Image (cartoon, grey):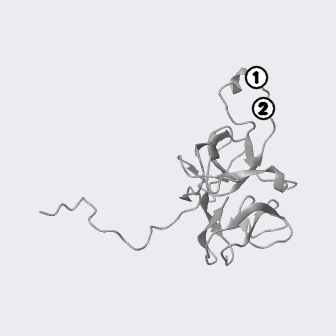
């Protein structure tokens, strides 16, 4: 007797990858995915940078284990400020006007950190080849087709190169590619 709710076959192709999804943990350990407090509104699959240091004398931060909060990238951000990518592991809010998924400021947010070896889904605005360098948008006025915090493989005004990161696999424009942290 066959039961229709039991998977009885293995498919050759994986399901669709969505922005912010962990595609592969790689060599990452639990300490490479950390919870931070976000200073600003953040979007899954986009990069975040270091925020202002905590006032460690403030008892309201006694339970926070991350060394600083994170925030959305901004004009003036540099490679050394980059912390990692926002992972879609909890519920997000959808903006009715822009249809953007986000977490408001002053929330706990899960970040896959740089150097973890994790592979995370990210939107691709242009054609991507395996091993391409990763650039993050920091100024939407100079790079109008790239929302701040999003990624590309092309250098130019309004973006910074993120050392140690690379695109993993190829993807076409408008699809979801993968970035190896």
Q: Please name the residue that numbered disc 2 is placed on.
A: 54
Marks 1 and 2: CB-CB under 8 Å?
yes
- Which of the 4 image quadrants contains residue 57? top right
Quick check: 125 left or right of 49?
left
The quadrant in which the C terminus is found is bottom right
Within 10 Å of the Cα at label 2, are there few (<14), some (14-19), or many (20+) other Cα atoms? some
Figure check: 150 above or below 66? below
Q: Position of residue 94 (x, y in %)?
A: 57, 53
- Which of the 4 image quadrants contains residue 128? bottom right
**Secondary structure of residue under mark 1:** loop
Q: Position of residue 167 (x, y in %)?
A: 67, 69
Numbered disc total: 2
Q: Please name the residue that numbered disc 1 is placed on.
A: 58
The tag on residue 91 is none
Front residue (pair 30, 148): 30
Q: Position of residue 58 (x, y in %)?
A: 76, 22
Front residue (pair 167, 77): 167
Q: Give the Cα separation between the discs numbered 1 and 2.
A: 8 Å
Figure check: 14 above or below 73? below
**Secondary structure of residue under mark 2:** loop
Residue 155 in view of the camera: yes
Quick check: 78 left or right of 62?
right
Which residue is at a point 81% across and 53% down the rendered structure image? 74
Residue lying farthest to the left in this orientation:
1
Q: Position of residue 140 (x, y in %)?
A: 80, 63
Residue lying farthest to the front in this orientation:
27
Residue 99 in view of the camera: no
Quick check: 57 left or right of 42?
right
- Which of the 4 image quadrants contains residue 1? bottom left
């Amino acid at each position: 007797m066959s039961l229709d709710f039991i998977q009885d076959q293995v498919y050759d192709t994986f399901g669709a990858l969505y922005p912010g999804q962990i595609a592969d943990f790689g060599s990452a350990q639990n300490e490479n995915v950390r919870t931070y407090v976000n200073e600003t509104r953040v979007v899954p699959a986009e990069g975040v940078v270091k925020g202002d240091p905590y006032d460690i004398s403030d008892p309201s931060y006694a339970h926070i284990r991350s060394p600083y909060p994170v925030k959305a990238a901004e004009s003036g951000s540099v490679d050394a400020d980059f912390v990692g990518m926002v992972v879609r592991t909890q519920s997000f809010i959808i903006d009715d006007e822009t249809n953007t998924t986000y977490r408001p400021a002053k929330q706990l947010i899960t970040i896959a950190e740089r150097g973890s070896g994790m592979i995370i889904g990210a939107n691709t605005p242009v054609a991507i080849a395996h091993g391409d360098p990763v650039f993050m948008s920091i100024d939407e006025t100079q790079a109008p087709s790239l929302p701040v915090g999003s990624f590309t493989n092309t250098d130019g005004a309004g973006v910074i190169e993120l050392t140690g990161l690379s695109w993993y696999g190829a993807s076409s424009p408008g699809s979801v590619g993968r970035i190896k942290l």
